Every structure is written in C-alpha cells, then in structure tokens.
Amino acid sequence: MVKRPKGIVFGSEVNGHPQESCDVCIVGSGPGGAVVADELTKAGRSVLMIEEGPLPSPAESMTPKEVVAKYYREMGLFTTHWPVQFPVFTGRVFGGTTVINSGTILPTPDRVMDGWASDIGVEFDRRVWRQIESEHDEVFSVKPCPTERMSTSNRLFAEGLERLGLPGGGPLPRCERDCEGSGRCVFICPKDAKQSVNLSLLPKSLERGMRVYVETRAVWLNKSKRKVKGVICRTAAGGELVVHAKTVVLAMGTLETALFMLRNGMGWRYPAVGRNLSIHPAAKVFAEMPEPVHSWKGVPQAYRYEQSEYPDVHFEGVFLPAPMGAIGIPFFGGELADWMRIYDRLAGFGFFISDSNHGRVRRIPGVGPFVTYRVTFRDLDNFCFALKLIARAYFAVGARRVLLPLLDRKNLYDSIESLDNNFPGKSLHPGQMYAMAFHPLGTCRFSATRDQGVVDVSGRCHRHDNLYIADGSAIAGPLHANPQMTIMTFARLVGRGLA
Ligand SMILES: Cc1cc2nc3c(=O)[nH]c(=O)nc-3n(C[C@H](O)[C@H](O)[C@H](O)COP(=O)(O)OP(=O)(O)OC[C@H]3O[C@@H](n4cnc5c(N)ncnc54)[C@H](O)[C@@H]3O)c2cc1C
Ligand code: SF4
C-alpha cells in the first residue's frame, strides 16, 4: 500500500474539470524538476508539480519484472527506430528516472564545458558550477563505492586490468546512505539507500508546501504568442486539470519534453526541438568463469575505467539479477537457456560511448514518436575497442569463454588468440550491435542563439518569456559522464534564476 504523503493528489481519484493556480508549474518530478522545486520552495514560491507516473511502492512488495512493467516508460520497450533499433530506458514514476537508475554520480567534465563554450556559445561560471556540484555531493551523500561492497564482476574486471598492466581504474562515486550492496538499484533500492530524488529532495519541497499531482499527464500548453498561461493535464481517472501558472518549467525528460513541445506546435518556432539527440549507446560483455561468482550480489555499477587513447569510451560495471539477465544475452531459445543455466558463473562488465552523431526525435501525428539515430564509424570503432578490452581483462583472470554483445555468430570466444584471429572488426555493421541506451540528452539543448538550440543559459525558451526547460533535454550531449549531476546542476541554476 502506497503511503499518502501530505501535498500529493492522486490523479486516479480526480474526475471532472478541477482548476489550480500557482506561481510556478513544474512538469516532471525527475532530478531536473526536483531541483528546481527545491530552489523555488526554499524561496517561498507556490509550486505545483505534475507527474505522469505513480508514487513508487516499497521495493520488497515488487519483483524486478513488476518494477519494469510499472515504472519504466513503455515497460522498457521504447526504442530508437531507424536505422538502428536500440532500447532507450527512462522512468515514469514520482522521482523520475532516479528511482530506477544506478546511483552513479559524476561531475561535468571540463572538456564538455569547454565544448559547450566553443560549439554553441554557452559559458557557465565554472566556479559557481563546481560549488553547486559540491553542494550536491553533500545533499546526496556522494562517496566512492568501497571495494568490499563491489560485485565480483567489478573486482574481477579490476584484477584483469591490473594483470594486463592497465592502470587508471577506480571506484565510482555513488549517491547512497548505508548501501548494503543488494544489487537492485535499477529496480528500486529495497533499503532506501540510493538517494533518488523522491527520497532526498522532493519530501523537503512537500514539507515546504509544494503540491503534486501524480498519475497526471500534462498534454497541452495554454499559450499566447510569447507567453504561456499554464498547462492542461489529463488525470488517470479521465479528469481534465487546468493549471494557471505565472511560469511553466518543463522537466519531463529528454524524449518527452521534446515530444510535448512538438505536440504543442513549437517545432515551427524552435527548429532545434527534437534534434541533437545523443544517447550514449551502451552494452556489456559476459564472461563464463570456472567457479560460481554470483555477480548479482554487491553493487553492480561500482568500478570505472577510461583509456586516454579512446577518450569516448567509458567503462562501468553493470549486472542484472537472473530474472532480468536474459535481456543482455544476444541469443534465443535453447542457446539462451544454456547461458541462463550457468548464470551464477557469469561475470559481466559494461561501457557507454560518448557518441559522435546526433539523432532526432520526431512526432508522427496519429502514430507517436519516431526516433532516428545513426551510428558512425568512429562509434563503431569505439564499440569494438570496448568489447575487446573487457574480453581481455576477463581472459586475464581465467574466463573460459566471453560472450560479446553482437547479433551474429562471431560473438563467442574461448581465448585471446581466437578473439585476435576471428573478431569481425572492420566488417562489423551497426545493425549487429546489441546495444541499448540510458542517457538520452540534448533535444531542447541550451545555446547562445535561437538557431542552434531551444533555451538560453537560464533555461528560458528563446522565444517565450515565461517557459523554461530544466531536464536532460536542455543538456547538450554527449557528456563523457553519467548525466544526473549535470542535469541537477543546470536545474539548480534555472531554479535560482526563477526564485
Ligand atoms: C536504468 C538506468 C540507469 C541509470 N543510471 C544512471 C546513473 O547511475 N547515474 C546517472 O547520472 N544517470 C543514470 N541514468 C540516467 C539518469 O537517471 C537520467 O539521465 C535522469 O534521471 C534524467 O533526468 P530528467 O529530469 O531529465 O528526466 P527523468 O528523470 O526521466 O524525469 C522525467 C519525469 O517526467 C515525467 N513526465 C514525462 N512526461 C510527462 C508528462 N507529459 N506529464 C507529466 N509528467 C511527465 C516522467 O514520468 C518522469 O518521471 C540511468 C538511467 C536508467 C534508465
Ligand atoms: S546496491 Fe542495493 S542497497 Fe545499495 S543502493 Fe543499490 S539497491 Fe540500494
């Protein structure tokens, strides 16, 4: 049974045509929306938040499959469409994707901020940016994952790198309090250890008087030429909620904010809406070890590694519990069953790529989203490098076989020699990549000018006086880091500007 915190209104109980008024209406309760709400409620502004998803139930009452079905958007089935089909995972729940993310939290790299300045004319005060990041370290209790809490997969990979003479790896910083390494971060933390914003920030804003409609979807912007007057929403019970607001902040996530802008006819005024999508394509390599390693125990995303020759490849641990583990295995039928039978002996490590190409989110009237995303040769080259490095590291610690995320017969190797001799390399085609994505960014990105982006450095839409965007869509990717810290730092600047 979900508790009924003060300030929460359940859309499943709201019929008819209710009306609400507020200073600021924030759409979306992920890290972007939550941080803006934090700043505004501290300043005493009246805030109404709209969230399409439900309140999360306690983790112990749900299996991982139920979490995916209930809190992952489109039950985890949302994908890019053409020319490659990669699943793109996001959350649809109070707290947004932080409820189902891995809890890694990394600062914005300097090279990314340099790129923003040179490519799209966006310069932030670096001292203020770093100051906000260290405030976030405090608020979200950020600390490196201790070695003893890492899953065996992470430790084996680190040992493999050491044997290969490759220094430079280290523990990932995570936002957690009293994490016990139960390994369920992406299916809701059962200990409430991971500091997702529904636990760390949103309750404080509710205490300060914020009101939230959950199970309520924002559908239309009520707008005139340069101003918005509010938002029209559909509740889960079929009601129509009309919100009158002096300011509207969109924080629906990279895909949904772009789709909302397009649905509301903003594509004409903002040609950049939906463009510049980066997704950080990601994949993982499995290794069959001689003994059981029970890789689902311990923190799955605990260790990282980067190599200066391949600065766009970011290695990070990942492993799913058995009921969901099949998603990472590129086989069907009997072969898949054979791999699941030895799941306790599998180690696995992942990576994501800072992509060199931009995709696009479109909306086909009457059909819905259509996402184009192309893989470049550079990205493919980075992908191959990552697969081979993880395979080598696991062979160095005694792996019997490695299974690469490739959709053809050349995905299974039993030695470094066979990998060197038979790896498809240059003949590989993007359609053979068994990849997925967790970090969509950039579809309403910030920019100095109207033609290159949608919002300015304060988050305000270039052609509207009181419409703001404060989520992953505003962040120009790729980011060379997991995005939640960057999204929250930008959102805090937006919130401070509005407070
Ligand atoms: C499995 C997984 C693991 C990840 N791990 C990490 C990690 O370890 N570290 C990291 O930095 N990042 C990680 N990420 C990514 C990170 O969580 C996201 O980049 C971040 O949460 C995005 O924040 P946001 O505010 O842009 O949007 P979201 O967090 O997606 O929040 C948007 C919210 O808006 C709501 N919404 C959308 N449309 C509407 C509408 N029309 N009306 C009302 N509400 C709406 C959604 O339901 C959602 O709750 C991970 C992502 C996934 C999927
Ligand atoms: S490893 Fe377990 S206890 Fe730690 S944050 Fe993840 S789910 Fe929570």
Image: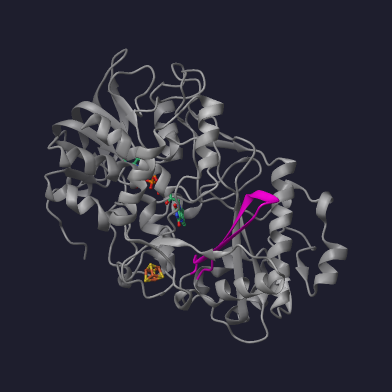
User: What is the magenta range?
Assistant: 300-320
Residue shown at 31% from the left, 14% from the top: 226
Residue 105 appears in which quarter of the rendering? Answer: bottom left
Residue shown at 49% from the left, 33% from the top: 443
Residue 86 position within the rendered picture, expressed as x and y whole percent measured from the top left: 60, 49
Along the line of sight, which residue is nearer the eye, 376 or 87?
Answer: 376
Going by the image, does 19 lie left or right of 261? Answer: left
Tell me if residue 435 is in the magenta stretch.
Answer: no
Which quarter of the figure is the N terminus placed in?
A: bottom left
Magenta highlight: main SS? strand
Residue 391 position within the rendered picture, expressed as x and y whole percent measured from the top left: 71, 68
Q: Can residue 152 be spotted in the picture? A: yes
In the image as oriented, which residue stretches furthest toward the bottom? 291
Residue 21 appears in which quarter of the rendering? Answer: top left
Residue 161 position within the rendered picture, expressed as x and y whole percent measured from the top left: 66, 69
Going by the image, does 498 lie left or right of 342? Answer: left
